[in-house]
Image (spheres, rainbow, N blue to C red):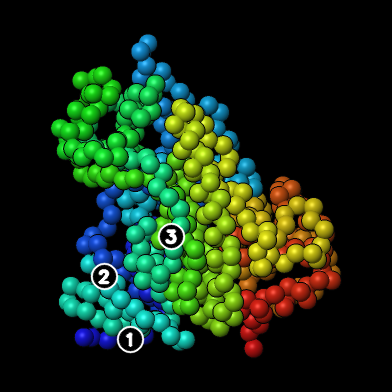
């Protein structure tokens, strides 16, 4: 049995969460392996909604433009009634603002999202290892010893940490004995990627709206020549997933015989679940994505929550591996488990609304208001907050560099570093440089020419905002309290260079 050199992290599962974590670790020069027992990448469209907050994450990871180009906005919904088809447009969509540059959810098939993430990972010098199955692991105080069955035999791999990003049936979670509490929602559905003759690709077709349990729909998948076929199915009935079987079901429920399913590249039947892991960490083993929470698909929340789990975990893992206190990793579960719990409640509420033919979606699905105000990483109580507060998402704003070129706060934040943003501090001394910290001063190297920073952040002259690597406000302090920022940065492993 071969033994590999030691690693920092083993990531088990190369879906969207595993790929996001791998990209974040790769840009931080962390040694890792990304393994997946599947023989090839996932080929289905299952999680097709990309929410605005996830678009911000993708901008930071350097992949947003490619993902946007791979999909598009959700099409109008065409409902077929006894009186004929009725088209419902989204209405007036929110416009981007200086603080929130992404406002509109995107429709991107999951396999295309993951393809773009793999491309980005390749640019960073890494790739998933398919056909490599985690078959066992042990951990001790110093790391994890994993057994990986690969095409060329079983290997022993040693790493400081193991992350289970291996989905709802997670081997890692089960091996840890972590309970996955929740329940089946007694709703069974089929979802398939199909090629179709006779259906317009400009609208989302839906039949059987009078009886949602007998509905069927065809949603065009932007960036492909396919549709996503969706239909609830009985709990105890075998479903024919062939092109002929899906055509027959469509004709039975839709009452139209001019649309024919020609090909079924991928199909799945599943029972909707709402479950949450009791813990996200056991020693040196952590869970992320669907391994930690499982959602019904309503509202397009599951994939986005998983990506943001990994985005929260990546910088913390890297910091601890670089010498930050282990307690920093405890904040991963502290921050992300309540988010998953809230998203589960939202998804179940939207599922019930969908059963009652109410498909309205509000700002709550965008995830732009997700924050960590109660986190132990949010340094509170030092200043009155007129604008952003610790734990809030850090807004974007257009600014001008002192050299005259236009830029944005998100461009200054992009990358694996922390950012300290000073607002017109006058003659006050700027804090000393630190590795992994970038300092910008409004009224110094950056000019708030349109007043957008002041509008978004509500800072007074002499105040400073510390922005985490994942785009959340860690602290807002006055110049007199900059010492608290220095102590805070020491505590998360951002140290002066000696």
As displayed, is residue 185 above or below residue 394? Answer: above
Tag in front: 3 or 1: 3
Is any atom of residue 438 visible in this view? yes
Mark 3 vs 2, N-terminal side: 2
Cβ–Cβ below 8 Å for labels 1 and 2? no
Kindly indicate the quadrant of the structure image that contains residue 265: top left
- Quarter holding the C terminus is bottom right
Furthest residue toward bottom: 498
Quarter residue 495 falls in = bottom right
Residue holding disc 1 = 5
SS category of the residue bearing label 2: strand
Q: Residue at x 68, y 65 (%)?
A: 378
Helix, strand, or loop for circle 1?
A: loop
Measure how far apart labels 3 and 1 are at the Cα level. 33 Å
Q: Residues within 10 Å of mark 1 (few under 14, many from 20)?
A: few
Vertical side of 100 occupied by 234: above or below:
above
Q: Earlier in the sequence, mark 1 or mark 2?
A: 1
Q: Earlier in the sequence, mark 3 or mark 1?
A: 1
Q: Is residue 391 placed above or below 225 in the rendered structure?
A: below
State left or right for residue 389 relative to residue 369: right
Tell me, for residue 125, which label it has, or none.
Answer: none
* Position in image of residue 61 (x %, y %): 47, 60
Q: Label 3's element?
A: strand
Question: On the picture, is 412 further left or further right than 187?
Answer: right
Label placed on residue 180: 3
């Amino acid at each position: 049995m071969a033994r590999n050199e030691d690693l920092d992290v083993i990531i088990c599962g190369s879906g969207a969460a595993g790929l996001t974590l791998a990209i974040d670790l790769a840009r931080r020069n962390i040694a890792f392996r990304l393994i997946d027992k599947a023989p090839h990448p996932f080929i289905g469209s299952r999680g097709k909604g990309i929410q605005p907050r996830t678009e911000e994450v993708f901008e930071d990871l350097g992949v947003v433009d490619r993902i946007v180009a791979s999909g598009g906005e959700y099409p109008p919904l065409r409902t077929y009634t006894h009186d004929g088809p009725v088209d419902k447009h989204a209405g007036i969509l929110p416009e981007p603002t200086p603080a929130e540059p992404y406002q509109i959810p995107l429709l991107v098939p999951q396999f295309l999202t993951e393809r773009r993430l793999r491309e980005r990972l390749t640019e960073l010098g890494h790739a998933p290892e398919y056909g490599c199955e985690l078959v066992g692991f042990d951990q001790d105080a110093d790391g994890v010893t994993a057994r990986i069955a690969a095409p060329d035999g079983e290997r022993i791999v040693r790493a400081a940490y193991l992350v289970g990003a291996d989905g709802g049936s997670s081997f890692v979670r089960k091996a840890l004995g972590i309970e996955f509490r929740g329940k089946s929602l007694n709703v069974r559905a089929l979802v398939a990627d199909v090629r179709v003759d006779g259906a317009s690709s400009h609208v989302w077709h839906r039949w059987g709206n009078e009886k949602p349990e007998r509905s069927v729909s065809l949603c065009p998948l932007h960036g492909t020549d396919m549709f996503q076929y969706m239909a609830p199915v009985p709990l105890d009935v075998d479903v024919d997933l062939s092109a002929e079987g899906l055509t027959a079901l469509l004709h039975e429920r839709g009452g139209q015989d001019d649309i024919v399913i020609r090909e079924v590249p991928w199909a799945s039947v599943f029972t909707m679940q709402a479950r949450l892991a009791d813990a996200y960490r056991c020693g040196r083993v952590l869970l992320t994505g669907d391994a930690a929470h499982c959602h019904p698909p309503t509202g397009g929340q599951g994939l986005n929550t998983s990506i943001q789990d990994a985005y929260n975990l990546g910088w913390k893992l890297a910091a601890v591996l670089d010498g930050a206190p282990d307690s920093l990793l405890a904040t991963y579960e502290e921050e992300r488990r309540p988010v998953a719990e809230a998203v589960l409640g939202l998804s179940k509420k939207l599922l019930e609304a969908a059963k009652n033919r109410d498909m309205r979606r509000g700002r709550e699905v965008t995830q732009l208001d997700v924050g960590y105000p109660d986190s132990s990483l949010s340094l509170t109580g030092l200043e009155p907050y007129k604008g952003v507060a610790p734990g809030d998402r850090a807004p974007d704003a257009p600014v001008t560099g002192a050299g005259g070129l236009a830029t944005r706060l998100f461009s200054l934040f992009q990358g694996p570093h922390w950012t300290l943003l000073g607002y017109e501090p006058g003659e006050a001394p700027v804090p000393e440089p630190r590795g992994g910290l970038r300092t910008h001063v409004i009224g110094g190297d950056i000019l708030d020419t349109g007043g957008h920073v002041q509008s978004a952040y509500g800072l007074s002259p002499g105040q400073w905002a510390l922005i985490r690597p994942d785009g959340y406000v860690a602290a807002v302090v006055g110049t007199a309290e900059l010492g608290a920022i220095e102590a805070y940065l020491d505590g998360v492993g951002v140290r002066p260079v000696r």
